[in-house]
Every structure is written in C-alpha cells, then in structure tokens.
Amino acid sequence: MTKKDRKSLIDIKDLHLEYGMKNNSIHALDGINLKIRQGEFLCLLGPSGCGKSSLLNIIAGFIKPTRGSCLMEGKPITGPDWHRGVVFQSPTLYPWMNVRENVEFGPRMRGLPEDEIKEIKDHFLEQVKLSGFGEKNTFELSGGMKQRVALARVLANYPQVILMDEPLGALDALTKVNMQILIRDIWKENNSTIFLITHDIDEALKLATRIVVMSKRPGKIIKEFNVAFTHELFENPKYTIHSDEYFEIKEEILQIINSQIEE
Amino acid sequence: MIKRIFKNFKMSTILTIITWTIILSFWYIITKLEIFTSTLVPSPYKVWTTFIYILNKGYNGIPLIIHLLASFERLFIALVLAIITAIPLGLLSGYSRRVRAIIDSIVEFYRPLPPLAYYTLLILWFGIDNTSKIVLLYLAGFAPIYIACVSAVTKINMDYILSAKSLGADSKKIFFKIVLPACLPEIFTGIRTAVGVSYTTLVSAEMIAATSGIGWMVLDASNFLKSDVIIVGILIMGLTGILIDYGLRYLEKKIVYWKGHV
C-alpha cells in the first residue's frame, strides 16, 4: 500500500484560529490544510509559539477553531473523545490513583468488563516495560517512567490516533533516546497512527514517516518532508545515521526554522 | 547512652521540651517564693491535685467526661453539618460564577464578624439550648471549608480534566473521580482551619450561656475566683485542641497521602 492510498483519518481544511478580545486578538493559525493518514507517524516542527499546540488542541477537541473544518473520518470533531488519545508535555497522571488505576482509567470509564480491563492493563504495562510497577504511586516514579505510564494509559483505549504534545521535552538526553525507541516500537507493533509535536529536529527525523514544518505565528504549514529513517532505525536501533540525505533534510529544516525566528 | 537518646530526638523536639521546662520551672519558682497569693497564681502542685479531684469527683457534681462530651457533641454536630454543606456549595461556587456571586457575598459579610456579636441573636431565635450553640459553631466552621473549596476548584490543573475527557470520562465521572480528589488536599486544610475556629468559638459560646461543657466550667470557676480550676480548664482545652489537630493531621496523611508530592 502506498502512502497516497492510505485512508485519511483526520482531515483539516483551511483552519483558522484567533483568540483573545476583538481589539487585541491573536491570530494563531492561518489556513492550515493537513491530513493525518492511518498508520503514519506525523511529526510537526516549528518555532516556539507558532501554534503547534493549538493545532493539537483543536484535533483533540479541547478548543474550537475560529474558521475552517477539522474532521475525523468525515465527521466534525466536536469535543474530546477516547478515539483520540492525548499525551501531554507534563504527564497528567492522577496522583490519587496508583499506576495500575491510572492505566485502567480509560477502559473503566468506558465500562468495559473487569477481566478485560485487567488484561488490557497487563498488556500495556508490559509494553511500556513497567510490569510489576502497577501498585506504585505515580509520584514515586521518575520523569521517564511517568511519561511511559501516561502513554500506557492512552494506549489502553486503543485510540485511532495518538496525539503527543512534546512528550519528551522535559526528559534528560539518555531517557529521551530510550523513549524514542519505545515509542517507535509501540507504533510499529500496534500499527498506531501518531501525531507528535516536537522542537527537536533529530527526534522528528528519527521517528516520523512525514514531517510538517510550521511558520512562526500566525502558523502556516510551509514545508512537508516524507522520510523513512524510522524504518532503518527500527531494524537496528543502534544504527547511527550517516546518510547525506539525513543531513540535507536536517539542514533544510534548520534553515527554515531559523529564517522564521530571524524575521 | 545520653548521646544516643539525644540523637533520637530532633533538634526542634528538644527545643520544645526545653521551652516547656523553663515555663513550668518559672511557674514553680514564682509560687515557691510566694510572690503572689495562691488565688492569683496557684502552684503547679495545687493545679495537679485540683485536676485529680475534678477527674474523680467532677465539677459542680457533673463528671469531667460529661463536660467534655457536652462540648464535643456540639462541636461534632456543627462540623459534620458544615462539612456536608460547605463542600458541595464551595465546589459549586468554584464551578459557577453565578452561584459564587450569591454565596460569596454572604460568606464574606459574616466571616469577619466576631461570633459573640450575633450570638445573642441566635439565642433569641433558637433558644438557649444546644441549637443556638450548634448554629454558631456551624457558621464558624462553614466559612473556612467553603473558601477552601472555591479556591481548590479554581486552582485545579485543567490538564487533569482535559485528559480525563479524552480518556472517555463523562462529566459526572470527572466530578467524582477527578475534581473531588484533586480538591481534597485543600478541602482538608479548610476542615483543619474550621475545627480550630469552631473550637475557640465553642469555648466562648459556653462561657455565655450553658450549664455544662468545658468552657462553662472555666467561666463558673472564674465567678468564684477558683484560679486552680481555671488553669486546669485551660490546660484541658489546650491539650484537647492539640490532640484534635493531631488526629486530623493523621487522617490527612492517610486520606490525601499524595499531598505535597505533585
């Protein structure tokens, strides 16, 4: 199946977002057109304050666009919904629940039977390599572990698309690399569709199948790249990329982003 | 050996013990030198024997435990009423600006009033029995819990609610599984403040109109210049106050164990 044939899950057409009062309103997003296709790993790059998070919040259903449409499988997104799981920049684990209860939260809210909830919990705690941590309190975990629980909690709902807002932004370099490998493995294993916001160009190049670069505010999409380094890295996680293509794309993206900042 | 005992104590505990040793010795020396008459400053020994006497024979023919129970019954009923009304109203006010506009102004108006200023009115309206005292304590306890709830809701981490929504929770479940527990630490602080405020109000209430209770005991003793009984009463009030707060802090640690970890 080629990329073009893949079913489009999220369809964003001519999306505008303005917020604030009429007199000093801020134009955050300016005519965004974007499709998220089933099974792809889409990374969104852009200078800080360009409206990346606003775009994610619209897709998640947390905020409504001023103009334009945001459809999921042809139906307008009217509010948050468990088919679109969200991993926040700082893990929003509920401290009054232990790790297990956090992961079980989604399935339990949806009223699944108890044995199925347990099965799901076991499966995804294992997938994020936290089996045996179920009864721990969330505040006993390190930053990376917390983000893994947050990921497992989202996966437990089998969402059609996973939205991630700089999930690794607050982690140290080593933990970050391990988390990137984990996210890629999970994406491959579960055939997930992932939309990830980052400001780390290497992270985008190493994970994405498609990279979208946004301009500074008002945010527009200025360039799109189809990349495949994530597949190579999946075969061999230790592999360091020396291909010229990698550095050419990286250089180009850097130039775009820098030109946006300097202007 | 002594070193080891010292190591087991924290510096702050040692300082507390030293402070109280100094206060007690000061008291003892003053009475030993008979600087003041024993009516003004009874000796520690006399206070102790009075305490033992009251413990065995009661005060005014009523056992000490009955005095204490009378006080705690009032306190307990008033606080339970305050908790079950102030928490829902406070959370609702935190949610809705309209509800807040109605309740906030009332609470803000009566909260700074000295309770004894309107206590006479309460006695006129509810009679001199327990009801007027319970209403007074209820009003004293309501405000801190209500205010804590409003502030807790307005400070709640919005990402908790958004993530719960995108995990499939409806608004009823969000209220009970997310909003309520997220507000619990602050609600607990409110309850602790409420207990403190109600407790001091209780004693003053009993001093004005009552025939039982620990506050009444002190007032009655002061009418007859029984300073030893007054001191016993004050010590009992102080110690029970500390014990109540200790119990609440213990409960707080058990129930909102995550407090301070977020």
Image (cartoon, coloured by chain):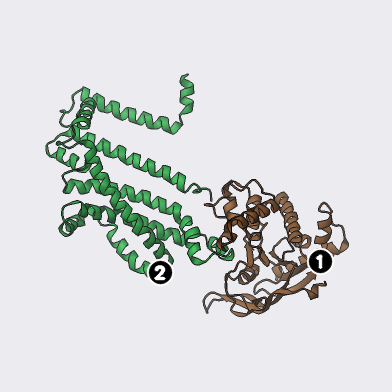
Chain colours: A brown, B green
Tag 1 and tag 2, C-beta contact below 8 Å: no
Instruction: Check disc 2 and give the amino acid type.
Output: Arg
- Name the spot of residue A87 as percent of width and height, x first: 63, 61
Which residue is drawn at the image coordinates 20% and 55% (left, top)? B119
What is the chain identity of the residue bearing mark 1?
Answer: A
What is the chain identity of the residue bearing mark 2?
Answer: B
Lateral position of residue B102 relative to residue B64, left or right: right
Along the viewing direction, whichever of A195 and B71 lies nearer the viewer = B71
Q: Count how many numbered circles sit on residues in the image.
A: 2
- Name the spot of residue B240 as percent of width and height, x first: 31, 39
- Name the spot of residue A25 as percent of width and height, x first: 55, 76
Instruction: Check disc 1 and give the amino acid type.
Output: Val
Q: SS class of the residue under badge 1? A: loop
Which residue is drawn at the image coordinates 77% and 72% (left, top)? A224
Circle 2 sits on which residue? B97
Number of residues whose C-alpha sits closer than 10 Å to that of mark 1, classed few (under 14), some (14–19) or many (20 or more): some
Circle 1 sits on which residue? A227
Query: Does A44 sit above or below residue B123?
Result: below
- Name the spot of residue A122 as percent of width and height, x first: 65, 52
